[in-house]
Amino acid sequence: MKNRGKFIVFEGTDGSGKSTQMKMLASYLNERGARCYLTHEPTDSPVGSLLRSCLTGRIDADEHTIAALFAADRLDHIHNPVNGILKKLNEGVNVLCDRYYLSSFAYNGGFVPLEWVIELNRPAREALKPDLTVFLYLDAEDSMERVMGRGETERYETVERQKKIRKNYLDLIARFPEENVATVVSEADKRDTQEKIRKAVNGLFGWRE
Ligand code: TYD
């Protein structure tokens, strides 16, 4: 049987550079012969597409519904027999994922009771915990600047809101030390940020620098 792949999650406020850093990490892992599969939440599945419509306001849904849809999308993401995360990991592929259940806790847990969101995500958490979560820490102002630069704003995108979400993340990281979160300050030069992420990942794979 092949060695199981590693599951590495990227978390952060909107515009913190997750997807760029994830791609940079994938090329590093590929160079070292570690195969990778890149994925994200909300997913591109029917449930994920429904969620995107809720986030842009095309569909009007209440916050409980949204939180429950995120949990459902995540369970399908984990268990899908065609392209689910567990399937990939069992094939020996490393999975890099843009957002996972900490996003639900930090975002949705600010609108509906956090303990309920944690409970909703218990099946996902029991089925699959990340081997490493990289939390990209970015000033709320910088975060909004980057988001505005993309010319699109979604449901959760205001400076006050980003500040609140960032605080939620920090509280959650302190509350769940078993989650193995590496907090990495998102630097102006993305190569500096990547350098720090690679250090954490080298540790995970048992690689020397
Ligand atoms: P995404 O498209 O990944 O935005 P970004 O590129 O800014 O990271 O995520 C869309 C939004 O969904 C983002 O504002 C965070 C929110 N979200 C939740 O509220 N709960 C969740 O469980 C997840 C995965 C995302």
Image (cartoon, rainbow, N blue to C red):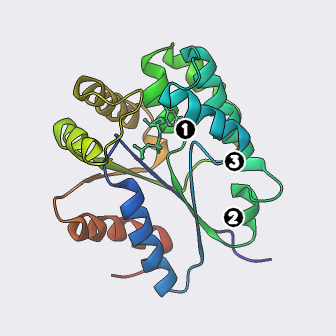
Image point 36% across, 40% down: which residue?
Answer: 152
The reply to whether discs 1 and 2 touch (Cβ–Cβ < 8 Å) is no
Q: Is mark 1 within 8 Å of ligand 1?
A: yes
Instruction: Classify residue 43 as left or right of residue 179.
Output: right
The reply to whether discs 1 and 3 touch (Cβ–Cβ < 8 Å) is no
Q: Amino acid at mark 3?
A: His
Q: Which of the 4 quarters of the picture holds residue 2?
A: bottom right
Q: Amino acid at mark 2?
A: Leu
Labels 1, 3: front one: 3
Q: Which residue is mark 2?
A: 89
- Spatial distance from mark 1 to mark 3, Cα to Cα? 12 Å
At mark 1, the secondary structure is: helix
Image point 42% across, 27% down: which residue?
Answer: 155
- On residue 101, which mark appears? 1
- On residue 111, which mark appears? none
Q: Which residue is mark 3?
A: 77
